[in-house]
Image (cartoon, rainbow, N blue to C red):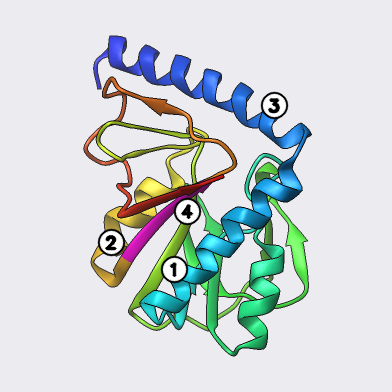
Amino acid sequence: MDEEKKRMKEAFRHRCLAALKKASVRGSYSRDKRILQRLYALIEKEHAVTIMLYLPLGTEVNLYPLIKQLRREGRVLYVPFMEGKSFRLVKYRYPLRTKRFGIKEPGFSRQYRTKQIDLAIVPIVGMDATYRRVGFGKGMYDRFFEKESKNIKKTVFVARTLCYSKEIVTDDYDVRADMVIVS
């Protein structure tokens, strides 16, 4: 990546994080509720049984009510388990532990996921005109999707507010969405 593009991406990420923090102060409950309703409708429409989710940080859409509902319905839920500079998916189960970056995750598991994921729900900081993700800058989702995208039927980005760049600030390796849901 050339230095100018790298600077543009960092500046964009910084603006988006500020907007997400602001959106998370007031009205986040109602924003999240609307997003969860749309996510659930999509899950139903797609007949998704095997779902990749994330365990939210403070600026991310709170998926816990959706997780609770999907577990009651017997859907198979997977969440990231950090390993080095990437992660692998493990079944969602209790107890959850807080790890690096304040991220919660289940304990270590040898229960590996099935190959196919019907729907991957991915948090974003922002995105550009190519529908590619700008995240927190660690590259974990990029490394995971590089290896696993062929096993994921549909990828959905979610955020409390859409931070969008008309200029292309992402790279070819950044994760691309099939759909974006924001409040």
- To which residue does mark 2 refer? 149
Residue 159 on image: x %, y %: 54, 43
Asked if the residue under mark 4 is in contact with the one under mark 2, i.e. CB atoms within 8 Å, the reply is no
Say which quadrant the C terminus sits in: top right
Which image quadrant for residue 117? bottom left
Amino acid type at circle 3 is: Lys
Q: Secondary structure at mark 2?
A: helix
Image: magenta residue range:
154-158
Q: CA distance from mark 2 to mark 3?
A: 32 Å
Residue at x 67%, y 32% (from the top left corner):
23
Residue 6 on image: x %, y %: 34, 18
- To which residue does mark 1 refer? 42
Residue 144 vs 91, above or below: the answer is above
Q: Which mark is residue 89?
A: none
Q: Nearer the viewer, mark 2 or mark 3?
A: 3
Which of the marked residues, 1 or 3, is nearer the chain's N terminus? 3
